[in-house]
Amino acid sequence: MRKEVVVQQDPKSPISEIFRTLRTNIQFMNTKGKLRTVLITSTFAGEGKSWISSNLAVTFAQAGKKVILLDADMRKGRQYSIFGVSPRPGLSNYLSGVGANENEEKTKELIDYIQETPVKNLYLMPAGNIPPNPSELLITPQMVDLLEQLKEICDIVIIDGTPSQLVTDSLILTRLVDSTLIVTASKQTKKEDLKRVIANIQNVGGKIAGVVVNKLTVSAKKYEQSYYYGSTNMNRVKTSNNRKRSNITYQKASHLVENKNDGVKNREVQNSKTIDNKIKDEEELPNALNKQKNEKSEEVLIDKTHDILKQINEYLDEEKKKLK
Ligand SMILES: Nc1ncnc2c1ncn2[C@@H]1O[C@H](COP(=O)(O)OP(=O)(O)OP(=O)(O)O)[C@@H](O)[C@H]1O
Ligand SMILES: [Mg+2]
């Protein structure tokens, strides 16, 4: 498991404390028990969606919740490498019905697509092979059905999405999930872009849980270098070379469904369509997705989600006022 899963590696760190507060806020919003699927999106690439969704998922698992982290970024999903599990089969294979490897017998049960992680209570459905048509796969009834099934077998589904200003994948998902969290990067995200994303989500009927401001720059003197992000350059966006990591394991999440709904265990994947084009293994990323990689920064960064929480709290206060 990567060092960036800071809430697991260093549960006592201030960052972990912030993630716990974020969890509490999300739980607080869940008073009617209906908030079971949370999507993480952003305006552009590299703003911290995968980092925040992995840490948030672990934080829920640490509270004893059964969590499924769904990597819905079928273009450059990297959750498998964060947790050191097998990259496939995953969501794209499940939705398309195309096996993870050639000649592979088609896997049929949902449980075959979900893996255990080194974190107790946390299960991961990786993104799978890169398909030629991620957005089309997300519009299928299978996606709606998948979320329903996942909700049946766990307490909360955290979904790592794509940037909403670049591709429509996450916008499609905002309609299917209970709530959406928008991650923005300090000094990177433009207000107009954020406003546009918020408007787009609201236009399709999606609910927004809050906005997370990530990557705030802080003075190095204020923080110990021991914090994970204390010595990290935020611009080292990973490439698909991650897929070549060798220390990955595949541990089928067989006992995830043991005590839950048996119907789910034996349920077959119904595919509405098969992909005509063969799934490409290492598709080139659109240039736009890489556009934020270039900026060079010597600044020492740390996640200072306090400001995010301030915004979420403001949002919650407004919601509370509406209830009165
Ligand atoms: N608060 C932070 N401080 C420093 N680096 C960070 C922070 N949050 C994320 N990063 C780093 O920035 C890079 C991009 O983060 P991440 O992969 O989470 O972004 P993303 O929004 O999922 O990107 P993409 O759109 O490409 O999927 C990673 O190397 C990550 O470790
Ligand atoms: Mg990501």
Image (cartoon, grey):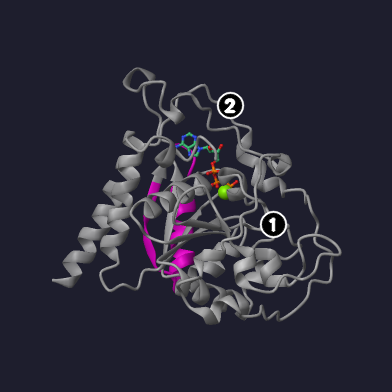
Q: How crowded is mark 1: few (under 14 residues within 10 Å), some or many (20 or more)?
A: many
Query: Which numbered disc covers residue 296?
Result: 2
Q: State whether residue 136 is above or below residue 123.
A: below
Q: What residue is rendered at 34% in x and 33% in y?
A: 13
Q: In the current view of this chain or complex, which residue is farthest to the right?
A: 103
For mark 1, what is the residue?
Answer: 88
Identify the secondary structure beneath mark 2: loop
Residue at point 23% right, 65% down?
319
Residue span colored magenta: 187-212
Q: Does the magenta stretch include residue 206?
A: yes
Tag in front: 2 or 1: 1
In this view, the residue in front, 260 or 26, is 260
- Whether residue 163 is visible, yes or no, is no
Residue 90 % position (x, y)? 66, 61
Q: Nearer the viewer, residue 247 or 36?
A: 247
Spot occupied by residue 241 in the image (x, y as percentages of width and height): 72, 39
Residue 248 place in picture, x, y as percent: 66, 44
The quadrant the C terminus occupies is bottom left
* Label drawn at residue 26: none
**Position of 134 compared to 164: left or right?**
right
The front one of 152 and 312 is 152
Disc 2 from disc 1: Cα separation:
33 Å
Residue type pointed to by label 1: Arg
Quarter in which the N terminus is drawn? top right
